[in-house]
Amino acid sequence: MAAGEEEGARTGTGTESEAAVEELRSFKDLGVTDVLCEACDQLGWKVPTKIQVEAIPVALQGRDVIGLAETGSGKTGAFALPILQALLETPQRLFALVLTPTRELAFQISEQFEALGSSIGVQTTVIVGGIDTMSQSLALAKKPHVIIATPGRLVDHLENTKGFNLRALKFLVMDEADRILNMDFETEVDKILKVIPRDRKTFLFSATMTKKVQKLQRAALKNPVKCAVSSKYQTVEKLQQYYIFIPSKFKDSYLVYILNELAGNSFMIFCSTCNNTQRTALLLRNLGFTAIPLHGQMSQNKRLGSLNKFKAKARSILLATDVASRGLDIPHVDVVINFDIPTHSKDYIHRVGRTARAGRSGKSITFVTQYDVELFQRIEHLIGKKLPAFPMQEEEVMMLTERVAEAQRIARMELREQGEKKRSRNDDDDTEEAIGVRNKVAGGKKKKRKTF
């Protein structure tokens, strides 16, 4: 079979792919070794997903892979299992590198590698921004089997950490490649490609095949096999999608109404800015909801803390910016609310993909104000369906406005106080720095006097 024919045969965009899933009922059928099949079983992975059916056999044959799959499709397993199996066959330190766009996704991939490889003693290290570089340098000195990194911080270590290199690397994975490139990591990716061996296996996974991804594919992969399980933008069948059309000034009241109506569920609420995420979280807390924020202006420890509390079901509402819209696997999200409509229609797919994962059902509700009509029409056009309106009792919403207005007032005050504390801390840091500089100068002057 010619390379082009093989590529076509592996592109599972229709009924052939579904038939393949029917035929292959287990990871063992895909060629995964017994010890890793047991690990899949312990994780509750009973049947391989479509992308795993397509990609794992090809990867186990030693081919480079381009995996095109929608969010929540089991991509991590599709590249982690072949890497761990190869590691079992030829044990080696600094064996694989996984590049990923966000810190949260890096930690999640690390968790999955550790869970799958716990019985074979696999060691992973996460290299991302927002964490002390010295502790990362010590972790790299121990030469883990798998490094999961964001491109910027990895380049920093390659250039500045003595004794660290990737000359023996056997596997490179670029996960969410379209997003890595959209976040302007092209320069860093180029630098990484220059210092790793050409003789390696490369897996490139992406939700979309953009021009930048095609360019990266040509630069980084050798005669790859394309494994696609979704040829167009779509949302999963078990997801019930709704919209509500509301006046902009009553958004908070409608949000509180929906949280009351659907009480008992877990929610992810997407806001467009860090400030609005923080404000809305404070507002909901003032009304007695167990809400927690996740956004880019929080420290890495606080971000992971928020995520872990929500995952452990200690909080039922996670308010987030698009930092949490892709890749994060939180199994129990029942409802996604687009409090602020996404500017880019594709982000809608990724946001609502946080619910109805792995065959479960879920709901999504998108708030559409008088300013959002055009954006909403673009979303409907992209997914190829008209969304129904979520049933509402307007009178009940209006009854909430007084309580919500009071909570808004308190939230604004708390937000102001938080801002002042932050400024005060920054001023203190500046003052300490200035005193340090003065002391150094004074010390220098004293020394000069002594020398005369």
Image: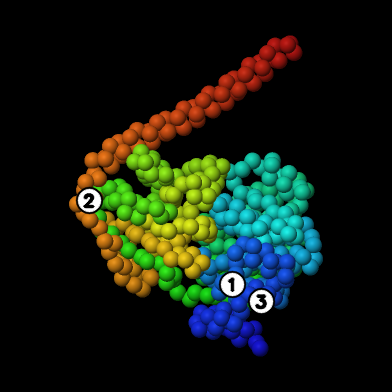
**Screen quadrant of the C terminus:** top right
Whether residue 13 appears in this view of the structure is yes
Q: Given this view, does label 2 or label 3 mark the residue nearer the observer?
A: 2
As drawn, 273 above or below 333 = above
Q: Secondary structure at mark 1?
A: loop
Q: Please indicate whether residue 181 sits to the left or right of residue 2 in the image.
A: left
Rounded to the nearest angstrom, the CA distance separating label 1 from label 2 is: 45 Å
Residue at 63% across, 16% down: 442
Q: Quadrant of the N terminus?
A: bottom right
**In the current view of this chain or complex, which residue is farthest to the left?**
395
Seen in the picture, residue 137 relative to 261 is either above or below; the reply is above
In depth, the one of 317 and 109 nearer the eye is 317
Q: Which residue is mark 2?
A: 396
- Label 3's element? helix
Mark 1 vs 2: CB contact within 8 A = no
Check disc 1 and give the amino acid type.
Answer: Val
**Mark 3 or mark 1, earlier in chain:** 3
Question: On the rendered structure, is 276 left or right of 452?
Answer: left
Whichever of callouts 1 and 2 sits on the residue coming sooner in the sequence is 1
Q: Tell me the amino acid under the disc marked 3.
A: Leu
The label nearer to you, 3 versus 1, is: 1
Instruction: Please name the amino acid that badge 2 sits on.
Output: Glu
Q: Residue 30 has which mark?
A: 3
Q: Kindly identify the residue that appears in the image at 68 percent across and 75 percent down.
A: 28
Colour mapping used in the image: rainbow
Q: CA distance from mark 2 to mark 3?
A: 54 Å
- Of 450 and 183, nearer the camera is 183
| Residue 345: percent from left, percent from top | 39, 63
Where residue 397 sits: x, y (%)? 24, 50
Element at label 2: helix
Specify which label sits upstream in the sequence, 2 or 3: 3
